[in-house]
Amino acid sequence: MPLPKLLIKKEEELTSYLKGGKRKTFKIPKYHGQKIDCIRQILSRDLQVGERDNNLFILYNLLLQNKNTEEYSKKLVIGKNRSLSTPLTEPEVKKACRKSYNYGCSGIRSKLAYIKCDNCKYKFEDGKLKESNILVRNIRILPELTSAQRGIVCLLGTVFEGEYPSINKMAKIAHMNSNTIKNAIKILKELQVIDKSLYN
Protein backbone atom coordinates (compact mmCIF):
# COMPACT_ATOMS: atom_id res chain seq x y z
CA MET A 1 0.00 0.00 0.00
CA PRO A 2 1.54 3.35 -1.01
CA LEU A 3 2.06 5.91 1.74
CA PRO A 4 -0.22 8.98 1.63
CA LYS A 5 1.49 11.93 -0.11
CA LEU A 6 0.95 14.29 2.81
CA LEU A 7 2.83 12.17 5.35
CA ILE A 8 5.55 14.07 7.14
CA LYS A 9 8.99 13.26 5.78
CA LYS A 10 11.28 11.90 8.41
CA GLU A 11 14.03 9.33 8.46
CA GLU A 12 12.81 5.98 9.67
CA GLU A 13 13.85 5.12 13.18
CA LEU A 14 14.97 1.64 14.11
CA THR A 15 14.18 -0.31 17.21
CA SER A 16 15.52 -3.79 17.82
CA TYR A 17 15.27 -6.56 20.36
CA LEU A 18 16.13 -10.19 20.81
CA LYS A 19 13.65 -12.82 19.65
CA GLY A 20 14.57 -16.45 20.16
CA GLY A 21 18.23 -15.48 20.35
CA LYS A 22 18.03 -13.60 17.04
CA ARG A 23 17.94 -9.84 16.77
CA LYS A 24 14.82 -8.60 15.03
CA THR A 25 14.53 -5.03 13.79
CA PHE A 26 11.26 -3.11 13.49
CA LYS A 27 11.33 -0.06 11.24
CA ILE A 28 9.06 2.66 12.52
CA PRO A 29 7.00 3.66 9.48
CA LYS A 30 5.98 7.18 8.50
CA TYR A 31 2.62 8.43 9.71
CA HIS A 32 0.67 11.60 10.44
CA GLY A 33 1.43 12.80 13.97
CA GLN A 34 5.23 12.63 14.07
CA LYS A 35 5.24 15.33 16.75
CA ILE A 36 3.09 13.18 19.05
CA ASP A 37 5.93 11.42 20.84
CA CYS A 38 3.75 8.85 22.62
CA ILE A 39 3.01 7.26 19.21
CA ARG A 40 6.75 6.85 18.61
CA GLN A 41 7.24 5.45 22.11
CA ILE A 42 4.54 2.80 21.62
CA LEU A 43 5.95 1.85 18.22
CA SER A 44 9.47 1.64 19.72
CA ARG A 45 8.53 -0.60 22.65
CA ASP A 46 8.68 -4.39 22.61
CA LEU A 47 5.27 -4.80 24.20
CA GLN A 48 5.07 -7.64 26.68
CA VAL A 49 2.26 -10.03 27.58
CA GLY A 50 -0.24 -8.09 29.65
CA GLU A 51 0.34 -4.74 27.93
CA ARG A 52 -0.12 -5.57 24.25
CA ASP A 53 -3.93 -5.20 23.99
CA ASN A 54 -4.10 -1.83 25.73
CA ASN A 55 -1.07 -0.39 23.93
CA LEU A 56 -2.21 -1.45 20.45
CA PHE A 57 -5.73 -0.16 21.16
CA ILE A 58 -4.37 3.24 22.23
CA LEU A 59 -1.91 3.26 19.30
CA TYR A 60 -4.75 2.66 16.84
CA ASN A 61 -6.86 5.46 18.30
CA LEU A 62 -3.91 7.89 18.43
CA LEU A 63 -3.18 7.22 14.77
CA LEU A 64 -6.83 7.92 13.90
CA GLN A 65 -6.81 11.11 15.98
CA ASN A 66 -3.83 12.31 13.97
CA LYS A 67 -5.55 11.97 10.58
CA ASN A 68 -4.27 8.58 9.53
CA THR A 69 -6.91 6.55 7.69
CA GLU A 70 -8.53 3.54 9.38
CA GLU A 71 -6.94 1.25 6.79
CA TYR A 72 -3.44 2.66 7.26
CA SER A 73 -3.78 2.76 11.06
CA LYS A 74 -4.76 -0.93 11.07
CA LYS A 75 -1.81 -1.73 8.84
CA LEU A 76 0.60 -0.05 11.28
CA VAL A 77 -0.94 -1.84 14.28
CA ILE A 78 -0.76 -5.20 12.49
CA GLY A 79 2.87 -4.52 11.53
CA LYS A 80 3.73 -3.54 15.10
CA ASN A 81 2.03 -6.65 16.48
CA ARG A 82 3.92 -8.94 14.10
CA SER A 83 7.20 -7.44 15.30
CA LEU A 84 6.54 -8.35 18.94
CA SER A 85 8.33 -11.16 20.75
CA THR A 86 4.91 -12.61 21.56
CA PRO A 87 2.31 -11.17 19.15
CA LEU A 88 -1.44 -11.14 19.69
CA THR A 89 -3.66 -13.49 17.69
CA GLU A 90 -5.53 -12.14 14.66
CA PRO A 91 -8.88 -11.88 16.53
CA GLU A 92 -7.14 -10.03 19.39
CA VAL A 93 -5.60 -7.53 16.95
CA LYS A 94 -9.00 -7.06 15.30
CA LYS A 95 -10.46 -6.28 18.72
CA ALA A 96 -7.67 -3.74 19.39
CA CYS A 97 -8.44 -1.95 16.11
CA ARG A 98 -11.73 -0.45 17.18
CA LYS A 99 -12.46 3.22 17.53
CA SER A 100 -13.15 4.42 21.04
CA TYR A 101 -12.75 8.10 21.85
CA ASN A 102 -10.08 10.76 21.69
CA TYR A 103 -7.25 10.11 24.10
CA GLY A 104 -5.77 13.14 25.84
CA CYS A 105 -2.33 13.33 27.38
CA SER A 106 -3.46 12.64 30.94
CA GLY A 107 -5.50 9.60 29.83
CA ILE A 108 -2.53 8.12 28.00
CA ARG A 109 -0.16 8.71 30.91
CA SER A 110 -2.60 7.08 33.34
CA LYS A 111 -2.85 3.93 31.19
CA LEU A 112 0.73 3.67 29.89
CA ALA A 113 3.12 4.35 32.76
CA TYR A 114 6.26 4.21 30.59
CA ILE A 115 5.23 7.17 28.41
CA LYS A 116 7.43 10.25 28.88
CA CYS A 117 6.15 13.60 27.64
CA ASP A 118 9.52 15.42 27.70
CA ASN A 119 10.07 15.24 23.94
CA CYS A 120 6.48 15.76 22.83
CA LYS A 121 5.91 18.91 20.78
CA TYR A 122 2.13 18.63 20.86
CA LYS A 123 1.20 20.57 23.96
CA PHE A 124 3.72 23.37 24.02
CA GLU A 125 5.18 23.53 20.52
CA ASP A 126 7.90 26.18 20.27
CA GLY A 127 7.10 27.16 23.86
CA LYS A 128 3.65 28.43 22.87
CA LEU A 129 0.13 27.35 23.74
CA LYS A 130 -2.28 26.95 20.85
CA GLU A 131 -5.02 29.51 20.24
CA SER A 132 -7.65 26.90 21.11
CA ASN A 133 -6.16 26.44 24.60
CA ILE A 134 -8.52 27.54 27.38
CA LEU A 135 -5.79 29.70 28.96
CA VAL A 136 -5.07 31.54 25.71
CA ARG A 137 -8.77 32.06 24.93
CA ASN A 138 -9.42 33.61 28.33
CA ILE A 139 -6.13 35.33 29.13
CA ARG A 140 -7.75 38.76 29.59
CA ILE A 141 -10.19 37.71 32.30
CA LEU A 142 -7.80 35.54 34.34
CA PRO A 143 -6.98 38.40 36.78
CA GLU A 144 -10.72 38.80 37.50
CA LEU A 145 -11.17 35.16 38.51
CA THR A 146 -10.94 33.79 42.04
CA SER A 147 -7.97 31.57 42.88
CA ALA A 148 -10.19 28.45 42.63
CA GLN A 149 -11.51 29.49 39.20
CA ARG A 150 -8.00 30.29 37.95
CA GLY A 151 -6.83 26.94 39.30
CA ILE A 152 -9.48 25.09 37.27
CA VAL A 153 -8.64 27.04 34.09
CA CYS A 154 -4.90 26.35 34.58
CA LEU A 155 -5.61 22.67 35.17
CA LEU A 156 -7.72 22.43 32.00
CA GLY A 157 -5.09 24.35 30.03
CA THR A 158 -2.09 22.29 31.09
CA VAL A 159 -2.56 18.88 32.74
CA PHE A 160 -5.89 18.26 30.95
CA GLU A 161 -5.27 20.30 27.80
CA GLY A 162 -8.05 19.62 25.31
CA GLU A 163 -9.88 17.38 27.78
CA TYR A 164 -12.74 17.83 30.22
CA PRO A 165 -12.15 15.33 33.04
CA SER A 166 -14.64 14.50 35.76
CA ILE A 167 -14.95 16.77 38.79
CA ASN A 168 -13.68 13.93 41.01
CA LYS A 169 -10.58 13.52 38.84
CA MET A 170 -9.83 17.25 38.99
CA ALA A 171 -10.37 17.26 42.74
CA LYS A 172 -7.90 14.42 43.16
CA ILE A 173 -5.22 16.02 40.96
CA ALA A 174 -5.64 19.55 42.34
CA HIS A 175 -6.18 18.48 45.97
CA MET A 176 -9.34 20.60 46.02
CA ASN A 177 -12.78 20.01 47.49
CA SER A 178 -15.21 18.76 44.81
CA ASN A 179 -17.85 21.32 45.90
CA THR A 180 -15.30 24.12 45.41
CA ILE A 181 -14.65 22.82 41.91
CA LYS A 182 -18.39 22.55 41.15
CA ASN A 183 -18.96 26.15 42.27
CA ALA A 184 -15.96 27.38 40.26
CA ILE A 185 -17.16 25.55 37.14
CA LYS A 186 -20.66 27.03 37.55
CA ILE A 187 -19.22 30.57 37.44
CA LEU A 188 -16.82 29.69 34.60
CA LYS A 189 -19.78 28.47 32.55
CA GLU A 190 -21.65 31.71 33.24
CA LEU A 191 -18.57 33.62 32.06
CA GLN A 192 -18.47 31.37 28.96
CA VAL A 193 -14.98 30.18 29.85
CA ILE A 194 -16.30 26.60 29.90
CA ASP A 195 -18.96 25.50 27.42
CA LYS A 196 -22.43 25.44 28.99
CA SER A 197 -23.07 21.95 27.62
CA LEU A 198 -20.35 20.53 29.88
CA TYR A 199 -20.57 19.44 33.51
CA ASN A 200 -24.39 19.34 33.71
Image (spheres, helix red, strand yellow):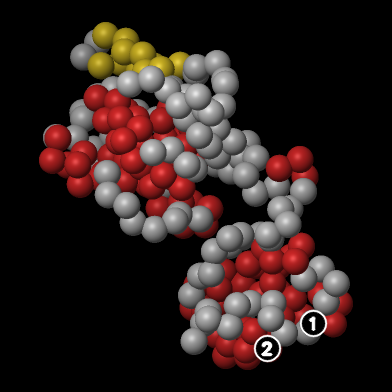
Above or below, 89 against 156 in this view is: above
| On-image quarter of the N terminus | top left
**x and y percentages locating residue 125 in the rendered image:** 71, 42
Inspect this view and state whether residue 18 appears. yes
Nearer the observer, 160 or 22: 160
Q: Mark 2 is on which residue type?
A: Glu
**Which is more N-terminal, label 2 or label 1?**
1
Nearer the observer, 3 or 134: 3
Q: Is residue 63 left or right of residue 146?
A: left
Q: Is residue 151 left or right of residue 91?
A: right
Q: Quadrant of residue 49?
A: top left
Above or below, 164 against 63 in this view is: below
The residue that appears at 41% across and 30% down in the rendered structure is: 43
C-alpha distance separating marks 1 and 2? 12 Å
In the rendered image, which residue does mark 2 sit on? Answer: 190
The secondary element bearing badge 1 is classed as loop
In the rendered image, which residue does mark 1 sit on? Answer: 145
Asked if the residue under mark 2 is in contact with the one under mark 1, i.e. CB atoms within 8 Å, the reply is: no
The residue that appears at 31% across and 13% down in the rendered structure is: 24
The residue that appears at 39% across and 38% down in the rendered structure is: 69
> How dense is the environment of label 2, judged by Cα within 10 Å: few (below 14), some, or many (20 and up)?
few
Nearer the observer, disc 1 or disc 2? 2
Inspect this view and state whether residue 114 appears. no
Nearer the observer, 71 or 95: 71
**x and y percentages locating residue 85 in the rendered image:** 25, 24
The secondary element bearing badge 2 is classed as helix
Mark number, residue 195:
none
Q: Is residue 94 left or right of residue 25?
A: left
